Amino acid sequence: MAKKDTGDTAVKEPVEAATLGGPYRDSFKLTPKRKEQLRGLYRVMRLTRDIDDRMRKLFRQGRYYGTYFSQIGQECTTTVPAFLAEKDDFIGPSHRELGCMVGKGVPTKYLFAQVYTKSTSQDRGVMHPVFFGWTDVRQITPCTCLATQVPLATGAALSYKMRGIKNVAFCFTGEGATSKGDFHESLNFCGIHRLPLVYTIQNNWYAESVPLEIQSGNPNQEQRAEGYGIEGVRVSDGNDAIWMLCVYEEAIERARNGGGPTLIMADTYRWYGHSEIDPATYRPDDELKRWMALDPIPRFEAYLLENKVMTSDEMNAIKAEIQAEIEDAVKFAEDSPESPAEVCLENVYAPDDFVNPLSEFDKVVAKEI
Ligand SMILES: Cc1ncc(C[n+]2csc(CCOP(=O)(O)OP(=O)(O)O)c2C)c(N)n1
């Protein structure tokens, strides 16, 4: 069981890379299997950062329209759980979840096709550029209306339990979206039925410009879990990849083996504005500097090097490979055709042969939930 860390809400000083692991520091053993896992996670984290960086720049160059929600600085909160998830586990994302797509292995070229809203993207250009979804890996497309993914993830978890399938539903929001009724109703339901759900609050301290302390009476939002009768965990350094890995492994194991849901609140920080059109002048400079010093990527790199999990040559080879992958993906997106306008009219009405899933639900609901 992870130790709850509810004392100090923010990390005050940068943590030495070699000491990554939080409360798991002493028990985390670098076995050959672990090392292999960390190398895989490193690639996913690095790829997420580099894709995001490139997408921001492309938007600023006017190469696609809309806006862009960068998650630079908070890579661990999405890449770690998605990397640990099985392909068939459900992901209910919000609007800042690029790392889930990368962690679940969606090919980079489709991610760029998505921001360019081209016909080669999964939704064929219908949705917002940054509403990443991919049914092949069971990640639904986010909705503009915050927190609507929470009841959907709860529904997926209910379905797993009813059908006796050992899958887990993952759900993500920022700390701001937890004020919605959807959040409370879903977690209450989840608590009653002990559903296999791992819920992440990515606490980056601001909902657009509104700081956590004036949008929530109890800023320690993981404590809400107690009210729903579920496990609540605070990771006060959500930029520590090893700490996050250990917390998620426990939460996933609990969910997959009938132990019920976990609510994880991970403290992190977004380096840029809410979206690329927000200069984020509401944040103190020293706060940003303090969190930039806790950048999850170089800290993880230093850990891997110091503990001889990877060499710098291996890391450089991965970085070069990633750059080439991104270049190919940008070309793929820019060369892809636009979707015809009529595509927006598809999937609006159910086809004649549509089977209402609720009628299927009625057949099994009487048995057991
Ligand atoms: C129901 C609803 N209210 C308000 C908005 C406008 N809105 C979009 S994102 C956002 C802030 C979300 O903050 P948070 O949940 O903390 O996520 P973050 O952007 O920090 O990742 C708001 C208020 C919305 N999309 N939906």
Image (cartoon, grey):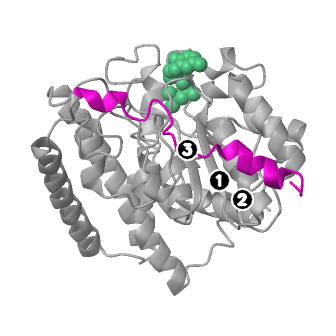
Badge 1 density bin: few <14, some 14–19, many ≥20, Cα 10 Å: many
Mark 3 or 1: in front is 3
Q: Amino acid at mark 3?
A: Phe
Badge 3 density bin: few <14, some 14–19, many ≥20, Cα 10 Å: few
Question: Vertically, is 354 above or below 368?
Answer: above
Q: Residue at x 67, y 59 (%)?
A: 168
Q: Secondary structure at mark 1?
A: strand
Q: Mark 1–mark 2 contact, CB under 8 Å?
A: yes
Q: Amino acid at mark 2?
A: Tyr
Q: Which mark is residue 169?
A: 1
In this rendering, would 65 be left or right of 100? left
Question: Which is more toward the observer, 30 or 74?
Answer: 74
**In 3D space, how far apart are the residues under numbered discs 1 and 2 (Cα atoms)?**
9 Å
Q: Position of residue 176 (x, y in %)?
A: 61, 25
Q: Which mark is residue 160?
A: 2
**In 3D space, how far apart are the residues under numbered discs 2 and 3 (Cα atoms)?**
22 Å
**In 3D space, how far apart are the residues under numbered discs 3 and 1 (Cα atoms)?**
25 Å
Q: Which residues are magenta?
A: 341-369
Task: First in sequence, mark 1 or 2: give its number.
Answer: 2
Q: Which mark is residue 354?
A: 3
